[in-house]
Image (spheres, rainbow, N blue to C red):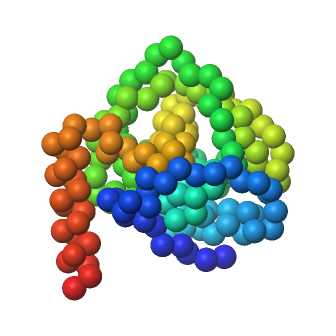
């Protein structure tokens, strides 16, 4: 297993649209292991392949308190959304230190393949539903700050670039 570097906003590679995984094989299973290790190490509750510069439709999530219930979603498709939505506080491992409110559906149903290539359907609400919507946005090249006002987004962009310049020194 390996820890993988996470792309930081405003890296343009975060805006690439991911392609479907063609086959759930040993390469994908090894990538899943590396992504889970990277997510747990970064203390995140989710990670999309886009964030580690792999542009394939693959997500790992664990919203459990004990951090022992990994969920692997390959080629996820949104098949239903609840009629209601509300504002949730979100963070992102690609935008460290920034938290803000994003409007998300209260519940979603998705279909996806698991790490063994088995098809599954998941209907969920709460933090898992929010996290699934956040990670599926990453696969479409969308970062949560794009839901914020242009003023907030530009401030975040400037702050991130400053931090990166300081870290590079
Ligand atoms: O995609 C990512 O960058 C992971 C991200 C997932 C996420 C967090 C919060 C709401 C939606 C999606 C994170 O794990 S950020 C760090 C974190 O653990 C966290 C932040 C806020 C609330 C709960 C957890
Ligand atoms: Zn994120």
The answer to whether residue 111 is above or below residue 17 is: above
Pick the quarter of the image with the N terminus. bottom right
Pick the quarter of the image with the C terminus. bottom left
The answer to whether residue 155 is above or below residue 27 is: above
Count numbered badges in the picture. Answer: 0
Q: Which of 126 and 131 is in front in this view?
A: 131
One can see residue 93 in this view: no
Does residue 57 appear left or right of residue 102 in this picture?
right
Task: Find residue 117 and report its horizontal and vertical position in percent.
Answer: 82, 50
Q: Which residue is drawn at 18% across and 59% down?
A: 158
Q: Nearer the viewer, residue 17 or 124?
A: 17
Q: Residue at x 26, y 82 (%)?
A: 168
Task: Find residue 38 and report its horizontal and vertical position in percent.
Answer: 54, 67
Q: In which quadrant of the rendered view does residue 128 lie?
A: top right
Q: In which quadrant of the rendered view does residue 55 lie?
A: bottom right
Task: Find residue 42 and report its horizontal and vertical position in percent.
Answer: 46, 65
Q: Which of 128 and 22 is in front in this view?
A: 22
Does residue 128 appear left or right of residue 26 in this picture?
left
Q: Which residue is drawn at 33% across and 42% down?
A: 146
The answer to whether residue 26 is above or below residue 112 is: below
Q: Which residue is drawn at 43% across and 21% down?
A: 85
One can see residue 29 in this view: yes
Task: Find residue 6 and report its horizontal and vertical position in percent.
Answer: 46, 67
Does residue 99 appear left or right of residue 93 in this picture?
left
Q: Residue furthest bottom?
A: 169
Q: Which residue lies furthest to the top in this view?
A: 83
């Amino acid at each position: 297993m390996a820890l993988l570097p996470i792309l930081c906003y405003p890296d343009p590679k975060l805006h690439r649209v991911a392609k479907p995984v063609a086959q759930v094989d040993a390469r994908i299973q090894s990538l899943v292991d590396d992504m889970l290790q990277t997510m747990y190490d970064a203390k995140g509750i989710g990670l999309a392949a886009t964030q580690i510069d792999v542009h394939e439709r693959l997500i790992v999530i664990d919203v459990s308190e004990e951090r022992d219930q990994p969920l692997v979603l390959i080629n996820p498709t949104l098949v239903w959304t609840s009629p209601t939505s509300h504002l949730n506080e979100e963070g992102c491992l690609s935008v460290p230190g920034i938290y803000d409110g994003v409007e998300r559906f209260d519940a979603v149903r998705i279909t996806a393949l698991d790490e063994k290539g088995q098809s599954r359907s998941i209907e969920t609400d709460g933090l898992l539903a929010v996290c699934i919507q956040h990670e599926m946005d990453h696969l479409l090249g969308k970062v949560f700050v794009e839901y914020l006002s242009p003023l907030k987004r530009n401030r975040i962009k400037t702050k991130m670039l400053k931090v990166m310049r300081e870290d590079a020194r």
